Amino acid sequence: MDILQNLVHMTGQRDHLRLEFSVLSTLMQLTDVLQVRALEIHPFDGRVWVRPRTWMENGQLVNSESDFLHDPHRRPLSDMPLLLAGLERKQTKIEHQTGDNLYTIWLPVWMHEQARVCIELTQASVLTEHSRDILLAIFQVYYNYQSLLDYSERDALTGLLNRKTFDEHLLRLSNSVQKSTDQSQQPWLAVIDIDHFKQVNDRYGHLFGDEVLILVANLLRSSFGSQHRVFRFGGEEFVVLLHPMTLDEATHALEHFRSTVQDYDFPQVGKVTVSLGFSGAHMQTPSPTQLLSQADEALYYAKENGRNRVCHFESLQAQGILNKHEQVTHNDVELF
C-alpha cells in the first residue's frame, strides 16, 4: 500500500527534481534496499563524468548543492567500467554483484538517445523475480512520466528547453549565487538574437526560416554542451545560462559561438549572424528579472551598434554607455 501511495504522489509532480525524489522514496520501500541514488552523467572536456545528484543519507533524501563541474564527488565514468560498458551498449538495465555480497542494479533514463541520469539501487541480496517485476514497473512509471515532463518543457521546433522552464532554472541559478563563497567566478546569462531574421523569412519563406532556427539551435548545443542550459524564448531569440566561470571565460565562450554562426553556411540562405548581450549573476544582482533585463539591454546595444557582436552589460555600464539608451525589459514577453 505504501508503494501505491508513493506512485500516486510521484505522478502528481510537475518538476524533474521532485519527481526524482519521489521515485527514489518509492524504491526505498522495496525489500532489502540499502541505498538508492540518482547519478548524473555529463560529457565534458573530452571525457564523460558521473556524480551522485540525489541519494539517501541518515534516512532522508538529499540533493547535491554544487553545480556539476564544481562537485567534489564528480569522477570519470571510466571509474565505473560496468556502468560505462552498459551505457555504451544502450542497455536499459545493468546488474552487478560485488565481492562483499552486495547487489547493484543501474537503470539508465534514456532520453533522445542519451542517458544523462541513471537510477542506482544497492541491495543486500539478489532480486527475486517478483521484486524485479515490481522494481521495473515502478521505474517504467517514472520513465513514462519523466518523458511527459521532458516533452512539455521542450520547444517543439528546436528541441531546446522552452520559455516555461526558464523561470525555474533562473531561480535555481539565483539561489546558487546566494550560497556561493567563490567570488572569482559567477554564473552568466546571455540573450542571443538572430540578426535580420525577418529578412530571411521574407526573402526565403518560413520553411527556410525554420531551418535556420533549427541549425542555430544545433550550433548552440555543440558550442555549449550539456553543462550549460540553452533555451528558445520564441521567434529568433535564445537564452543561455552559463555555469560559474570568469568574465574572460564567458566572453570567450560567447565569442566562439558568435564566430561559429558567422562561419557557418546555411543551406539556401547563405550567411547568418547573431548578436549577444550578457550579464553576470552576482550577489549584487537585485533579482532574476533584473538579470534578464540587463542582458537584454546589452543585446539591444549590440544590435543598435553594428550587430554580429557580443556585449557585456557591466562593461558597458562602467563606460557610461548604457545611460544613453532606454532600458529594455521582457515585460511584453511576460504578457505573451
Image: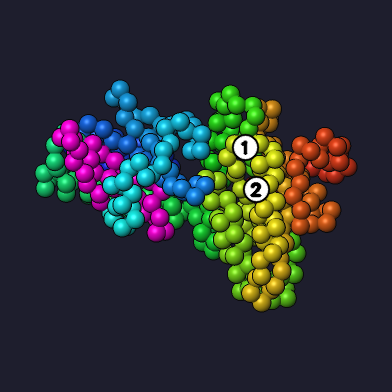
Q: Amino acid at mark 1?
A: Met
Q: Residue at x 76, y 46 (%)?
A: 311
* 162 vs 269: above or below: above
Q: Residues within 10 Å of mark 2 (few under 14, many from 20)?
A: some
Q: Secondary structure at mark 1?
A: strand
Determine which of the numbered discs, if any, sits on residue 253 in the image: 2
Q: Which quadrant of the figure has residue 314?
A: top right
Q: Which residue is mark 1?
A: 245
Chain-order first, disc 2 or disc 1: 1
Which residue is at 46% across, 48% downward? 47
State the image coordinates of residue 307 (x, y, percent, origin top left). Answer: 79, 57
The verdict on residue 103 being magenta is: yes
Q: Position of residue 183 (x, y in %)?
A: 64, 26
Q: Nearer the viewer, residue 187 or 235?
A: 187
**Residue 30 visible, this orientation:** no
Q: Secondary structure at mark 2?
A: helix
Tell me, yes or no, whether the highlighted magenta stretch contains residue 336. no
Tell me, yes or no, whether the two marked residues, 2 and 1, touch with CB atoms within 8 Å.
yes
- The segment highlighted magenta reads 93-122
Picture quarter containing residue 22? top left
Q: Position of residue 6 (x, y in %)?
A: 27, 38
